[in-house]
Amino acid sequence: MNHGEMLTAIWDTVQEIAMTMLMVEIAPVSPKSLTFNEPYVPSSADTVALIRMQSGLQGGIRLCSNRASCLALAGVLFGGSFDTLTEDASDSYCELANMVAGGVQTILSDQYDSLKITPPELFTRDHPEPGYPGYYHSVHYSFVMDGNPFFVETFFKEGSEE
């Protein structure tokens, strides 16, 4: 798995979700490779929905944003708006992350037919992410939806830890 393949999988998935499910326009800002088999340090974000990858590829897919963007993204999927991170807002944001991870999983299924993803976990400034020990490749793709910035960051290595 190379960085370009992962960035393409992220772009294709986010674009499809935006056009077919959310009916909104999402603009790409900057795709970039972060690390090549180095200790992974996640990019900072106020709100993170994490989906872990197992079997074939190890690591995770992170949907990340500031709080306002989290609420805007969740509101689009929910069909309403949120002023605070309620249970419905959290569920909607996590479901978006799940949709992204599922799309990436589908795109990579020819190469990693046994790739499994976990249910999403939500992390905030009050409930921070755990560390990610080990060496990973990582990529980061930034987007904007109606002035609301967000990014998808993936860290991965080949192999299975089952």
Image (cartoon, rainbow, N blue to C red):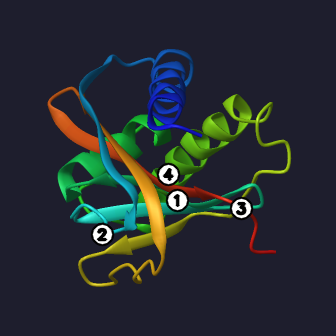
Q: Is residue 93 above or below residue 13?
A: below
Q: Is residue 81 visible?
A: no
Q: Is residue 153 above or below residue 28?
A: below
- The image quarter containing residue 105 is top right
Three-letter code, disc 4: Ser
Disc sitting over residue 91 in the figure: 1
Local crowd at mark 1 within 10 Å, few (<14), some, or many (≥20)?
some
The residues tagged by marks 3 and 4 sit, at their Cα atoms, a distance apart of 31 Å
First reached walking from the N terminus: tag 3 or tag 4: 4
Q: Residue at x 46, y 81 (%)?
A: 133
SS at mark 4?
Answer: helix
CB contact under 8 Å: marks 1 and 4: yes
Three-letter code, disc 1: Asp
First reached walking from the N terminus: tag 2 or tag 4: 2
Which residue is denoted by mark 2 in the rendering?
A: 41
The residue mark sitting in front, 2 or 4, is 2
Three-letter code, disc 3: Gly
Q: Is residue 141 visible?
A: yes
Which residue is denoted by mark 3 in the rendering?
A: 159
The residues tagged by marks 2 and 4 sit, at their Cα atoms, a distance apart of 26 Å
